[in-house]
Image (tube, rainbow, N blue to C red):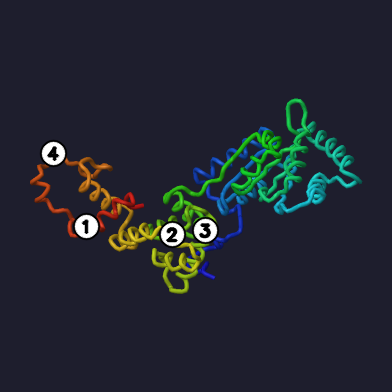
C-alpha cells in the first residue's frame, strides 16, 4: 500500500522469514558462520537456540537456499509429530519407499546414508521449533546419530528452537542426546541502536529505496527501546509506522509516529522513567532538524560541562587550562537549557 509513496519495489518489513532480506549484522554473522562450520565439517548434531523472533528460521532458510547441489536437505517445520510421522518425513527426504516396519526402515536408511557418504554426498535434516518435539522423537533422533563410520557422521542434524530447547536437553532422560551435541549456537537480539539502524537501513535498501533514511535517529532509538532488539518486533513497528506515515502524508517518520504505533501494538517500554528521559531529549534535539554531527557536538559539549576530562575529541582542542573563574564567565551555547534536561541527557548515555 505504501510502496509507491516511499519509492519501494518490495515491502521490506514483512513478518515472514524471507531470506532475501537477511541483514548481516555482526551478531548474525557469528551464528551463520557457526552453522556453516558445523555443516561443512560434518559435526553431526548442531543445536541453535534463540528467543522468539530473533531470526532463527530466516537463518535456516538462507542456508538451505545456498547449500551445494551435493547436499540433500530436509526441513521439518512442524515439530508436533509422532514417531511414525517423523520417520515419514525422513523417508520422503531419502526417497525410501519399500519398508514395512521400523527395523527394516533403519536397515535401508543405513545403507542409503552409507552409500551417499561414500560418494562424497552430504545429508542434512533440519528441524525447526525443536523445543516442541516429544522426548520419544528426540530419542529417535539420538539413535539416528548412530549412522556413522569410524571417522564421520553420515547424517547431519540441526535442531533449532527457543531457549526451552536447552532446558529440555538438560533433562536426565535425554542426557545421552545432550552428549551427542557437537556444536551449540545462540541467536541474540540486536544489541544496540547502531545495529538496529543498520538493520532498518539495509532492509529499506533491499526493498529498493534510494533514500533509506526515512526513520529519524529519535525514531530508531525508540524502536530499540520498544523492540528490545528483536527483529520480528522491529519489522512490526517499522511496517505499521510506514503505513501510519503514508496515511498522514509524511515521508519522514519521527518518534511520535513510533510511539503511536507501539501503543497500538502494546509494545511500549515498561520503564516509564526511561521513556520520559528519552522524550525530553527528543524535545531538546528534534531529530528532523539536527544532523548526526550536530547531535554528537551537543553531547560532547554536555560531557565537557559535566566532567573534568572530555569523553570525545573536539574539532578544536583547547591548549590551555581555564581557571574556575574563566569557566564561570564563559557562556555555553546550551546554558539556557533546563538543568533537568541536562541530567537526563547524561543518564541515557548520550545521543545515538
In the rendered structure, the answer to whether residue 116 lies left or right of residue 251 reads right
The residue to which callout 3 is attached is 233
Callout 1–callout 3 Cβ contact below 8 Å? no
Image-quadrant location for residue 218: bottom left
Find the distance from the CA under tag 1 to the CA under tag 4: 27 Å
Question: What residue is rendered at 61% in x and 49% in y?
Answer: 162
- In this view, the residue in front, 57 or 33, is 57
Find the distance from the CA under tag 2 to the CA under tag 4: 45 Å
The residue to which callout 4 is attached is 320
Badge 1 or badge 4: first in the primary sequence: 4
Hey, which residue is sitting farthest front in the picture?
172
Badge 3 or badge 2: first in the primary sequence: 3
User: Which element is circle 2 on?
Assistant: loop
Image-quadrant location for residue 245: bottom left
Callout 1–callout 4 Cβ contact below 8 Å? no
- In this view, the residue in front, 49 or 43, is 49
Q: Nearer the viewer, mark 1 or mark 4?
A: 1
Question: What residue is rendered at 22% in x and 40% in y?
Answer: 309
Percent x, y of residue 336: 18, 60
The residue to which callout 1 is attached is 339
Find the distance from the CA under tag 3 to the CA under tag 2: 12 Å
Q: Nearer the viewer, mark 3 or mark 4?
A: 3
Find the distance from the CA under tag 3 to the CA under tag 4: 50 Å
Percent x, y of residue 58: 61, 51
Amino acid at each position: 500500500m505504501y510502496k509507491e509513496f516511499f519509492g519501494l519495489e518490495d515491502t521490506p518489513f514483512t513478518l515472514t522469514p524471507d531470506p532475501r532480506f537477511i541483514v548481516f549484522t555482526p551478531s548474525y554473522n557469528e551464528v551463520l558462520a557457526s552453522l556453516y562450520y558445523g555443516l561443512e565439517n560434518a559435526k553431526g548434531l548442531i543445536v541453535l537456540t534463540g528467543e522468539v523472533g530473533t531470526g532463527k528460521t530466516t537463518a535456516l532458510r538462507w542456508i538451505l537456499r545456498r547449500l551445494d547441489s551435493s547436499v540433500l536437505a530436509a526441513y521439518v517445520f512442524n515439530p508436533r509429530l509422532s514417531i511414525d510421522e517423523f520417520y515419514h518425513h525422513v523417508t520422503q527426504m531419502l526417497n525410501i519407499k519399500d519398508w514395512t516396519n521400523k527395523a527394516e526402515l533403519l536397515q535401508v536408511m543405513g545403507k542409503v546414508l552409507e552409500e551417499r557418504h561414500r560418494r562424497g554426498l552430504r545429508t542434512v535434516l533440519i528441524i525447526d521449533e525443536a523445543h516442541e518435539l516429544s522426548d520419544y522423537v528426540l530419542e529417535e533422533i539420538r539413535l539416528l546419530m548412530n549412522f556413522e563410520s569410524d571417522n564421520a557422521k553420515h547424517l547431519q542434524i540441526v535442531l533449532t528452537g527457543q531457549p526451552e530447547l536447552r532446558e529440555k536437553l538438560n533433562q536426565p532422560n535425554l542426557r545421552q542426546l545432550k552428549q551427542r551435541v557437537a556444536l551449540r549456537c545462540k541467536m541474540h537480539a540486536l544489541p544496540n541502536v547502531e545495529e538496529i539502524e543498520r538493520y532498518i537501513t539495509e532492509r529499506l535498501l533491499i526493498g529498493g529505496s534510494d533514500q533509506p533514511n526515512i526513520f529519524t535517529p529519535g525514531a530508531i532509538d525508540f524502536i530499540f527501546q520498544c523492540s528490545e532488539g528483536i527483529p520480528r518486533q522491529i519489522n512490526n513497528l517499522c511496517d505499521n509506522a510506514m503505513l501510519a506515515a503514508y496515511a498522514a502524508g509524511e515521508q519522514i517518520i519521527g518518534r511520535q509516529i513510533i510511539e503511536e504505533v507501539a501503543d497500538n501494538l502494546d509494545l511500549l517500554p515498561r520503564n516509564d522513567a526511561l521513556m520520559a528521559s528519552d522524550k525530553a531529549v527528543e524535545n531538546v534535539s528534534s531529530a528532523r532538524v539536527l544532523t548526526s554531527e550536530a547531535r554528537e557536538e551537543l553531547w560532547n559539549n554536555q560531557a565537557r560541562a559535566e566532567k573534568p576530562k572530555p569523553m570525545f575529541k573536539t574539532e578544536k582542542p583547547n591548549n590551555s587550562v581555564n581557571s574556575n573563574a574563566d569557566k564561570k564567565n564563559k557562556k555555553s551555547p546550551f546554558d539556557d537549557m533546563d538543568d533537568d534536561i541536562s541530567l537526563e541527557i547524561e543518564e541515557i548515555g548520550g545521543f545515538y
